[in-house]
């Protein structure tokens, strides 16, 4: 077993590094004459600390590239004179012209080599402070600046003008090829296009450089367009292949429609039991912290059996797919050893974990097969991005020591998890990436977009969001938009993990130019208190209302459990333990129908009735749908069970969760409707999801004694309507005089739809 190498690694990364200036040429960084907050325009200008946003310049489609670079900005500020100062002009302020009819200001900065150049705007002789949140940025020394990215004008450029897919199985895309600066035309014989896995011959207009791509007769599912093109001089397009994600589906998908299933690959299912591609567990690591044989083939088998669709799931989040180290490493307690079974210790940012393959196919090939199988069923795939750190065996550590922070280890003396959140290392063998060095920003963006394109990924979960500088998440968000969705590509979802009860901290990373949403940990705490500890529904409603007032348009993900916290079934039984001293007893897997087992079934199913009917993109953590037990990490990551190995109790709970998930899938109101609170007291909770036009769903739950109440529905406009319970456990309910009489037994819930 490979021991830890704390001192050599830390010494390597700290030797010769100036923490205020990292990267090639840092000794030449000038003193940028800016004073944060010095420029204070009028009411319509920047309000420092309030996340200023520039106006969006109109999208520009080029036909010919120009080696003389023109900078275009649309600052949302009040000023008399506007200048620009940056790396391209020696940080000497240069006048900008404008505004034009679109509100744009421009400056010619001459011919520049391909690369990214930092700059700041100068308003009336004063440098701006922090740049707006909706522009690309680059750190130079301790200053974050706007960024101008210059491409290679000697090569063609591919641009999506428009793209769409229709329910009838047709796809249409228009792509503009901007010729290199010398005007060389595109070579029609060297244009190659695929739609999904089919090669398609485009219509090529050589004179204009426009490509028309059409395909028909496509089955339901994902059929992304990829375009390669070469000009008459033999020069390939700089950004080939152009990638345009498209879906053929009856109804256009929005991420509000998502029900996410978190499949922990190593613990979900072993698809080639007894063979395991020649791999064995890591020596010296106990079973619960070791590889247990789950693989991509196991997920494929579940897809083929319809397991996810039966739950109403339309999105699968996979644990990180990167290659991880082959040896064991010490845990935070300094005594327990772990393998990289979880995927969060990447040693190669593009290689796929070989253990997730099998005797008949590599991990890479099986991952493609898994994603194809999911897409054919209308199911999206989310990758888990580890962008905060890498493992010490990653080649970057020895080749680019300046890419890492010289930080301390989180949780040690004078290095609190919150106080040093961005620069601290999770473990001595997990060096922290320093995104104030722009080289690592470019490397990580390139690798991440490469993974998205290679595997046709639909969304990502960003691990440890609060531990990273905003520059990487903003840059990733804007690149996904600019490269894939502008022009008609399918929407992409970026959801972050910020483990906190502070909604304000969660929202620090959620906006139109960074994360789309985050996992709703503040709501999770209220959910657990309600359905595990029997707290009042009033408290739960208070948490929901607090989220609504804070999150705005952020698309959050509510959940009942995840891989970092004690299993909900174990919390309910009060039998928490850890796998180091012995596995926690799994009551749900036992026979019989004990009071405790029914308590688990009732509480978990009602918890799901709440979580899966909330706005956002709710999450099912694998195993919670069968009441899988487990204490803290790694005991909460036990191997999943499936029919025919489920107990009667597990099957009962699974049937209930399936009915709830199916209700969500079938009701647009449950997915997209506004939430309307109708009744709340300690034990009875009733709310509606109102999608307008009478499309209403009503959710009711009672965790006390039997109740019968007249519920006022007059605000919903459903007088005279009859609702039935989509989960099958409640009689029909009719509305008369704007009211409905609702009767629920103890620990009974209903999801009422028209």
Image (cartoon, rainbow, N blue to C red):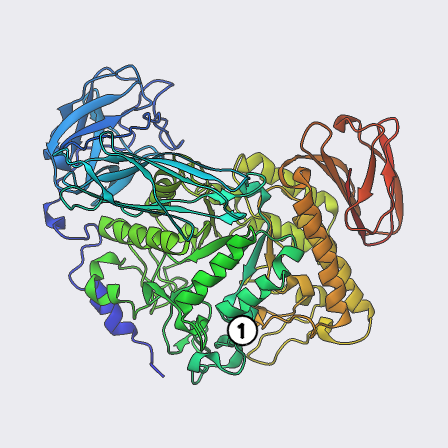
Instruction: State whether residue 185 is above or below residue 502.
Output: above
Q: Can you identify the residue that label 1 sits on?
A: 271
Q: Nearer the viewer, residue 750 or 59?
A: 59
> Hey, which quadrant is residue 261 in on the image?
bottom right
Q: Quadrant of the N terminus?
A: bottom left
* Residue 356 x, y percent position in the rendering: 45, 71
* Residue 54 x, y percent position in the rendering: 34, 27
Q: Is residue 732 left or right of residue 694?
A: right
Is residue 517 among what the camera can see? Answer: yes
Point 82% across, 71% down: residue: 594
Q: Quadrant of the C terminus?
A: top right
Point 33% across, 69% down: residue: 429
Q: Nearer the viewer, residue 642 or 414?
A: 642
Q: Nearer the viewer, residue 405 or 365?
A: 365
Is residue 531 among what the camera can see? Answer: no
* Residue 477 x, y percent position in the rendering: 38, 43
Point 34% across, 40% down: residue: 202
* Residue 721 x, y percent position in the rendering: 83, 32
The residue carrying pointer 1 sits among few (fewer than 14), some (14 to 19) or many (20 or more) residues within 10 Å by Cα, namely many
Labels in figure, total: 1
Instruction: State whether residue 516 is above or below residue 589.
Output: above
> Hey, which quadrant is residue 481 in on the image?
top left
Q: Is residue 110 left or right of residue 272?
A: left
Q: Secondary structure at mark 1?
A: loop
Q: Is residue 638 left or right of residue 100?
A: right
Q: Nearer the viewer, residue 751 or 663?
A: 663
Instruction: State whether residue 97 is above or below residue 736.
Output: above
> Hey, which quadrant is residue 124 in on the image?
top left
């Amino acid at each position: 077993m490979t021991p830890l190498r704390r001192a050599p690694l830390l010494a390597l990364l700290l030797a010769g590094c100036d923490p205020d200036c990292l990267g090639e040429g840092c000794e030449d960084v000038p003193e940028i004459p800016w004073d944060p907050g010095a420029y204070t325009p009028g009411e319509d200008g920047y309000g420092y600390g309030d996340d200023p946003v520039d106006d969006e310049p109109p999208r520009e489609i080029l036909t010919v590239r120009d080696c003389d670079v023109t900078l275009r900005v649309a600052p949302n500020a009040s000023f008399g004179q506007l200048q620009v100062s940056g790396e391209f002009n020696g940080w000497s302020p240069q006048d900008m012209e404008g505004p034009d009819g679109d509100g744009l200001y421009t400056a010619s900065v001459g011919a520049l080599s391909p690369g990214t150049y930092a700059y700041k705007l100068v308003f009336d002789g004063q440098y701006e402070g922090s740049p707006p949140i909706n522009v690309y940025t680059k750190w130079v020394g301790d200053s974050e600046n706007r960024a101008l990215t210059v491409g290679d004008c000697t090569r063609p450029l591919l641009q999506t003008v428009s793209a769409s897919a229709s329910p009838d199985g047709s796809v249409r895309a228009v792509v503009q090829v901007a010729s290199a600066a010398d005007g060389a035309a595109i070579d029609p014989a060297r244009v190659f296009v695929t739609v999904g896995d089919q090669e398609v011959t485009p219509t090529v207009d050589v004179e204009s450089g426009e490509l028309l791509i059409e395909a028909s007769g496509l089955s339901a599912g994902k059929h992304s367009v990829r375009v390669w093109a070469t000009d008459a001089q033999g020069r390939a397009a700089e950004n080939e292949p152009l990638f345009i994600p498209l879906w053929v589906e009856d109804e256009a998908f929005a991420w509000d429609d998502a029900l996410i299933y978190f499949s922990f690959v190593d613990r979900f299912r072993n698809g080639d039991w007894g063979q395991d591609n020649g791999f064995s567990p890591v020596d010296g690591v106990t079973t619960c912290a070791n590889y247990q044989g789950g693989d991509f083939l196991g997920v494929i088998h579940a897809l083929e059996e319809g397991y996810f669709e039966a739950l109403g799931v339309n999105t699968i989040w996979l644990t990180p797919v990167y290659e991880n180290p082959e040896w064991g490493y010490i845990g935070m307690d300094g005594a327990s050893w772990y393998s990289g079974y979880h995927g969060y210790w990447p040693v190669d940012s593009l290689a796929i974990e070989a253990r997730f393959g099998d005797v008949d196919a590599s991990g890479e090939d099986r991952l493609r097969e898994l994603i194809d199988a999911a897409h054919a069923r209308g199911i999206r795939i989310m990758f888990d991005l580890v962008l905060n750190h890498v493992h010490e065996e990653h080649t970057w550590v020895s080749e680019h020591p300046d890419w890492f922070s010289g930080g301390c280890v989180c949780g040690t003396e004078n290095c609190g998890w919150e106080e040093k959140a961005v620069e601290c290392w999770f473990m001595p063998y997990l060096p922290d990436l320093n995104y104030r060095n722009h080289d690592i920003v470019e490397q990580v963006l390139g690798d991440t977009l490469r993974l998205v394109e290679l595997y046709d990924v639909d969304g990502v979960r960003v691990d440890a969001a609060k531990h990273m500088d905003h520059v990487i998440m903003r840059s990733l968000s804007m690149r996904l938009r600019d490269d894939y969705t502008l022009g008609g590509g399918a929407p992409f979802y970026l959801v972050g993990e910020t483990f906190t009860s502070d909604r304000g901290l969660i929202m620090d990373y959620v906006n139109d130019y960074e994360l789309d949403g985050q996992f709703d940990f503040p709501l999770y705490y209220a959910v657990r208190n309600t359905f595990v500890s029997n707290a009042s529904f009033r408290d739960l409603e208070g948490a929901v209302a607090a989220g609504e007032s804070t999150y705005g348009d952020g698309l959050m993900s509510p959940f009942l459990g995840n891989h970092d916290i004690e299993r909900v079934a174990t919390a309910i039984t009060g039998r928490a333990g850890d796998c180091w001293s012995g596995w926690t007893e799994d009551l749900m897997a036992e026979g019989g129908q004990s009071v405790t087992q029914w308590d688990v079934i009732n509480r978990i199913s009602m918890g799901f009735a709440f979580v899966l009917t909330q706005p956002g993109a709710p999450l099912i953590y694998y195993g919670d749908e069968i009441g899988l037990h487990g204490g803290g990490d790694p005991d909460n990551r036990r191997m999943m069970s499936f029919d025919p190995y489920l107990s009667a109790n597990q099957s009962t709970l699974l049937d209930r969760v399936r009915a709830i998930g199916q209700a969500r899938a079938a009701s647009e109101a449950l997915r997209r409707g506004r939430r309307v609170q109708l009744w709340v007291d300690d034990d009875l909770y009733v709310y509606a999801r109102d999608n307008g036009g009478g499309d209403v769903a009503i959710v009711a739950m009672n965790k006390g004694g039997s109740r019968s109440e007249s519920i006022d529905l007059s605000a919903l406009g459903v007088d005279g309507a009859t609702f039935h319970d989509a989960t099958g456990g409640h009689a029909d309910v009719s509305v008369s005089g704007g009211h409905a009489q609702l009767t629920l037994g103890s620990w009974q819930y209903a999801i009422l739809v028209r």
